[in-house]
Image (cartoon, grey):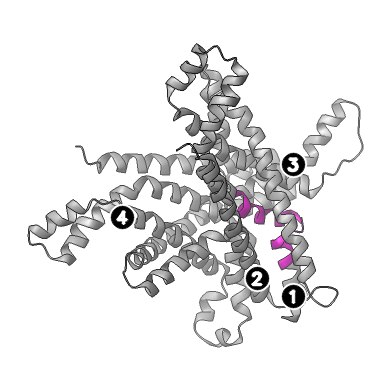
Amino acid sequence: MITSFPKLLGATVVTLKLLSASLFFGLFLGLFFAILRLNKNILIYKFAYGYSYIFRGTPLLVQIFIIYFGLGQIEYLRTTFLWIILKEPYWCAIIAFTLNTGAYTSEILRSAFQTIKPGIIEAGKSLGISNKIIFYKIQIPIAIRQSLPAYGNEIILMMKGTSLASTVTLMDLTGVAKYIISTTFKPIEVFIVAGGIYLFMTFIIHNVIKYLEKKYSFQQ
Amino acid sequence: MELLAFGKTGWGDELFYATLMTIAVSITAMLVGFFFALIFTPLKLSKYKTLNLVGNFYTTVIRGVPELLVIYLFFFGGSGAIMYVASIFGYYEYIEINAFVTGSMAIGIISGAYSTEVFRGAIQSIDKGQFEAAKVLGINKFGQFYKIILPQMLRLAIPNLSNVWQITLKDTSLISVTGLVEIMRQSYIAAGSTRDPLFFYSFAAVLYLLLTYLSMKLINKLEVRYSRGY
């Protein structure tokens, strides 16, 4: 139990790298698709809706496998520069996680945009503020505040999702835990240590989000 | 298309049975989850601090630890734990548990943690007056719960339970690591032997989409039924 701790701690760094990279890219992707969802053009709306429907309706494991095993099959892709990225399991995992969290984030942000009271936007308009400034200075900050609790959940779900990187040969926290279990046959001890590390990360994320919610609450 | 043919030439029938297996595991896991929710929801709502602690421990740990890790615990630790219990009763032979049982237990425990939270929320949002009125009318405890609280609770719980069902259905894909032949595992086998992973994994994605779509349709009907009075 004690000897496995440093190994698992080292693997936690991989998990955190995967998590932060996919959350960073996923947030931009989510914002982009949330804005598309608010578009009045039915085709653009359908495209954004289809994206979020497909990525929320299928398991993350399928998505990783399609990107890691499936895309490598296309001969044409192997000749382009994209292959440098797609042959690495690390980047495949990040692409899959980004697309997945982007879909959930776009739903969270969309509902946040839709709950903004029209009066607030009207107030901005009557003050003569341009539409662009209204969007960036009024709608986005309010939407971010509205979506904080749901986004906190999404971060925790994504942290758990990164464990699937172990299925494409990456040695993240779960991957190393599985390796130690299968070599030492001590499933319960390893589960306690690895699970403890995950719970600790959940605890930290939960409290950071709680702090941010308090800091940016409307009644100050 | 010939890849999906039924019979010996294609993978159609294998994938069909694999889909049935996914449905079977999901339903079993959901029921196991309800069983756990039945135990832990009262604990979470109890007056006693110690019982609260037990309930909170369950939901916090399970919802904070990756599903895959729980599955590995069951997969590697399951038969060991059973053999340990059996050895107390004087049985020392090797016991191997079926992948279906391991898988649906692991997913069931995860699903149970989410269901517990849903039921707790639903019971807490029922008006206190309903409990008091039932008591005043002299209805016994059994009737209070089954005839008055449960129907109201279900109306509130069904939309959230449909989310739990979606999570459970998608989580079953993770059982493929234990070798149970469900959609994901069958696609893996087919992809390996035909060297066409793109097609088979995409087809698996379509099957999952179909399952989520159809179950949403079904759940919406239930929702309408249970909110008749409103």
Which callout, 4 or 2, points to the residue nearer the camera?
4
Q: Quadrant of residue B145?
A: top right
Q: Chain of mark 1?
A: B
Q: Quadrant of residue B77?
A: top right
Q: What is the secondary structure assignment of the residue under circle 3?
A: helix
Left or right? Give the position of A53 relative to A184: left
Rounded to the nearest angstrom, the CA distance separating label 4 from label 2 is 34 Å
Residue B178 image position (x, y, % from top left): 74, 53
Q: Which residue is mark 4?
A: A114
Q: Which residue is mark 1?
A: B4
Q: Identify which residue, A180 or A143, lies in the foreground.
A: A143
Which callout, 4 or 3, points to the residue nearer the camera?
4
For the C terminus of chain A, the quadrant is top left
Q: Which residues are magenta?
A: B168-187
Which callout, 2 or 3, points to the residue nearer the camera?
2
Q: Classify B113 as above or below B216.
A: above
Q: What is the secondary structure assignment of the residue under circle 1?
A: helix
Q: Does B160 appear in magenta?
A: no
**Mark 4: few/some/many CA within 10 Å (<14, 14-19, 20+):** few
Rounded to the nearest angstrom, the CA distance separating label 4 from label 3 is 47 Å
Lower position in the chain sequence, tag 2 or tag 3: 3
As shown in the figure, which amino acid type bears the numbered disc 4? Answer: Gln
Q: Residue A66 got which mark?
A: none
Q: Are marks 2 and 1 in contact (CB under 8 Å)?
A: yes
Q: What is the secondary structure assignment of the residue under circle 4?
A: helix
